[in-house]
Amino acid sequence: MKELDTIRPDESRSYSTFLTDGCLCCQKGAKMVLFVTGLCDRDCFFCPLSEERKNRDVIFANERAVLTDADVLEEARAMSAEGTGITGGEPLLELEKVIHYIRLLKEEFGENHHIHLYTSTAPSDEYLQVLAAAGLDEIRFHPPFELWDKLDDSDFDVSLKSA
Amino acid sequence: MNELEFSETNAEEMKKRGYVLIDDESNTVLGSAETARKAFDAFDLCDSENGECKMNFCSSRYKDAVQLRLRLLRTARQNARDFDEITEDGTIIFGRIKVPAEFLESFDVFLKENELPEESYAVDADRNTIETACGIAEELATIFEEENPNFGQIQIWIIEQYPFTGGFVVGSERIY
């Protein structure tokens, strides 16, 4: 068993054995949060989204309401973003929008602009291929609570392995 | 793993299930961090060098103290005007003077007569406001108290907000 000090506690009581590139970028304050839709087909009791976002088809780049692509790019420039985390709602309900923003950000800021995505769905191999081809760097699965005991037999197991 | 948090929209459902806050000052759920800790232990702290089990617990405080604060600081450093004061939290503090439209021009002349350099304030003719350094606004408030020059119903405010145009106002205080 490893000693406790091998994990990295910080002043905020976070700790890890490993941080992804997405996390490292966030740690510098360099990740933009792109909220692509408030729509979601789940109804998790712990969902903390505000009234102005929850179940609404709205887009925000950090706190900025987004009407056009220019809004997204302006926000990214304002914070000198080195990466973007795509969240929601359930982003993959709006796959085309997600693909559009991945391409937009990569074209504008280059391949090194690190993009990660959150989903509570178990995307098919085909979806994953499309996301990867668009340039998505990292994906984070949030399987629903009721599947936690049986992840091995779920679609998430398949998605995780192909991701 | 993310720390479980209370918000305005989930509070009712959370309470129903017996979740409570860690204290009055945060939105953190009691026991969440400890549960994450147990998950680390359950995997024997996993040998990260062999890449067998990679874990990260991101606390509620991290999101505020690191993610948000550093992002705001980054934005502030890039966008702050010469006269904005950048706080440790990444917010900016400045003075805002609300001048009736008909006095906006003469007030600008008044500032120039007082030898205020152009870069030390900004005139917004659409909103009839002048923004300037906190210290200058305070000085102006003192001058107004003493001399009461006639610029109509003028107001002087100290504003603290997120570091971009139209950013969330964290605090404001009227000083004249």
Image: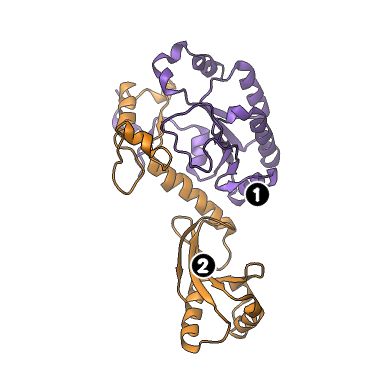
- Give the chain coloured purple: A
Residue A82 image point, x, y percent: 59, 42
Q: Residue at x 47, y 44 (%)?
A: B67
For the residue pair A72 and A38, the one nearer the viewer reads as: A38
Q: Residue at x 55, y 53 (%)?
A: B75
Left or right position of B48 against B86: left
Residue that numbered label 1 is attached to: A74
Residue that numbered label 2 is attached to: B94
Secondary element at image label 1: helix
For the residue pair B5 and B7, the one nearer the viewer reads as: B7
Residue A13 image point, x, y percent: 34, 40
**Chain assignment, label 2:** B
Which quarter of the picture shows residue A151? Answer: top left
Q: How many residues crowd around disc 1 within 10 Å: few (fewer than 14), some, or many (20 or more)?
A: few
Tell me, yes or no, if residue B4 can be seen here. no
**Chain assignment, label 1:** A
